[in-house]
Image (tube, helix red, strand yellow):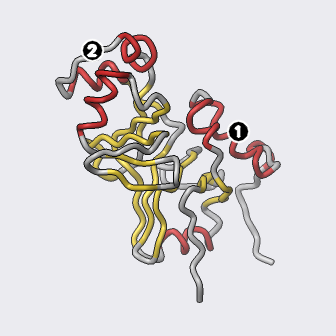
Amino acid sequence: MDTVSLTNHFLIAMPAMADPNFSRTLTYVCEHNAEGALGIIVNRPIDMNVAGLFERVSIPLESEVANSELAGQPVYYGGPVQTDRGFVLHRPKGQWHSTLNVTEEIGLTSSRDILQAMSESGEPGEVVITLGYAGWSAGQLEWELSQNAWLTVAADPRILFDLPPEERLPAAMQLLGVDFANLSEVAGHA
């Protein structure tokens, strides 16, 4: 049986999602293959902004661009795995020490060199910075999908990089033509 890859798709948590880590979340899938899946939650800001994160990791915001455009952006709860580790979802992809190529344009980087570049030049300018990520073992995400835990839709980078966090989930729902308020907590199978 062929497996459909959900890389570069959104996972929309269904209203009945019992796991508090994922309730009312929009997760961007960065990698999905036979070994499992990796994603980051993109609509749950934490009580820290980029300036605070950079201060915490001892990287000064050196450029005016970094100070004016990046400093106030929120840092997000990316998921329950490795919550002490930072991940930068970014466009353009660029060349960094540790980048997962998500698409031709988008990368997920976990190395410090991207933070240093952001400090010095403000680039890449389109970023979502998280602490932690969401991970699924082989077959786990497929099982959760069969249990109606998630809706899926092809991702739109504008939702990731152009919208504030509170608008991302409703915008992803609109891609499906569905209003979150109209979703039932009980799903059936045909």
Residue hosting label 2: 62
Q: Quadrant of residue 86?
A: top left
Q: Quadrant of residue 61?
A: top left
- Please tell me which residue is depicted at 60% across the width and 62% down the height of the picture: 149
> Dot 2 surroundings within 10 Å: few (below 14), some, or many (20 or more)?
some
Looking at this view, name the residue that lies furthest to the left: 58
Quick check: 79 above or below 112? below
Question: Which of the two discs, 2 and 1, sits closer to the camera?
Answer: 2
| Type of amino acid at the residue the image marks with label 2 | Glu
Quick check: 101 above or below 162? below
Q: Position of residue 147 (x, y in %)?
A: 61, 70
Split into 4 quadrants, where in the image is the N terminus? bottom right
Q: Position of residue 145 (x, y in %)?
A: 60, 68
- Please tell me which residue is depicted at 82% across the width and 49% down the height of the picture: 177
> Dot 1 surroundings within 10 Å: few (below 14), some, or many (20 or more)?
some
Residue hosting label 1: 170
- Please tell me which residue is depicted at 55% across the width and 73% down the height of the picture: 142
Element assignment for label 1 = helix
Residue 123 falls left or right of residue 141: left
Q: Position of residue 117 (x, y in %)?
A: 30, 29
User: Distance from label 2 to label 1 (Cα)?
Assistant: 35 Å
Looking at this view, name the residue that lies furthest to the bottom: 1
Q: Position of residue 68 (x, y in %)?
A: 43, 11
Whichever of labels 2 and 1 marks the residue nearer the N terminus, that label is 2
Between 190 and 38, the one lying in front of the other is 38
Looking at this view, name the residue that lies furthest to the front: 95
| Type of amino acid at the residue the image marks with label 1 | Pro
Split into 4 quadrants, where in the image is the C terminus? bottom right
- Please tell me which residue is depicted at 49% across the width and 39% down the height of the picture: 91
Element assignment for label 2 = loop
